[in-house]
Image: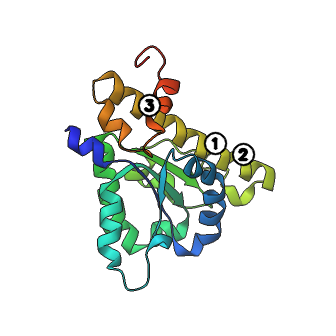
């Protein structure tokens, strides 16, 4: 079980290529967390030409601790997402406690899709991002970054509390882990 938790350290963003502009905007909001070495964000734009893309996606899915699902009609229509990404992400949530964060981009059948709607969406499905002002859209994306940060902080603190500090520490850059864990869980490591 500990090895399973250790492997799960990435934030995986699942999206339809029709929604690539939303992916780019979300990555802007997540960049400070990456820069601080708090998270490793993965989406398929990291796949290099000539790579075995299905294997790379499979490895990233196997290491997912938090999955952000950019939900739209195009997302729900994607056979690849439905067949290759969602089953692994849903299994990770059930078996390993991975966090699933649906972000509703546009009107879709999200609420009629029980496998997804069982997870609380970041924003109200009746108020998808495309219907919001730019300021409100940005606020939702900030909220996504805050939820990711809180989820990973909780995971690190829980690992430390259960004597798995080394497991939590290896998921962030060497030299930063101890201070990061002390800051996140005072009283547990100090």
Q: Which mark is residue 26?
A: none
Question: Between tags 2 and 3, which lies in front?
Answer: 3
Given residues 48 and 129, the one toward you in this image is: 48
Disc 1 + disc 2, Cβ < 8 Å = yes
Q: Quadrant of residue 170?
A: top left
Residue identified by numbered label 1: 143
Q: Position of residue 46 (x, y in %)?
A: 47, 70
Residue identified by numbered label 2: 139
Q: Position of residue 43 (x, y in %)?
A: 47, 65
Q: Residues within 10 Å of mark 2 (few under 14, many from 20)?
A: few
Q: Residue at x 39, y 68 (%)?
A: 81
Q: Residue at x 40, y 17 (%)?
A: 188
Q: Residue furthest bottom?
A: 50
Q: CA distance from mark 3 to mark 1?
A: 26 Å
Label whose residue precedes the other's in the sequence (3 or 1) = 1
Image position of 188 (left or right of 162): right
Disc 3 + disc 1, Cβ < 8 Å = no
Q: Position of residue 76 (x, y in %)?
A: 46, 66
Asked which secondary structure carries label 2, the reply is helix
Residue identified by numbered label 3: 178
Q: CA distance from mark 2 to mark 3?
A: 31 Å
């Amino acid at each position: 079980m500990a090895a399973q938790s250790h492997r799960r350290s990435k934030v995986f963003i699942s999206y339809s290529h029709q929604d690539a502009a939303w992916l780019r905007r979300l990555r802007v909001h997540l960049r400070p967390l990456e820069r601080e070495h708090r998270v490793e964000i993965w989406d398929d734009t990291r796949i290099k030409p000539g790579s075995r893309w299905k294997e790379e996606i499979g490895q990233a899915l196997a290491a997912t601790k938090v999955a952000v699902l950019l939900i739209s009609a195009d997302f729900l229509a994607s056979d690849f997402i439905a067949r290759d990404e969602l089953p692994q992400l849903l299994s990770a949530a059930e078996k390993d406690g991975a966090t699933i964060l649906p972000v509703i981009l546009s009107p879709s059948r999200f609420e009629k899709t029980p496998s997804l709607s069982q997870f609380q969406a970041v924003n109200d499905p009746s108020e998808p991002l495309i219907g919001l002002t730019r300021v409100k859209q940005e606020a939702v994306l900030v909220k996504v970054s805050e939820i990711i940060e809180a989820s990973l902080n909780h995971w690190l603190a829980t690992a430390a509390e259960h004597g798995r500090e080394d497991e939590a520490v290896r998921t962030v850059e060497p030299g930063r882990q101890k201070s990061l864990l002390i800051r996140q869980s005072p009283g547990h490591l100090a």
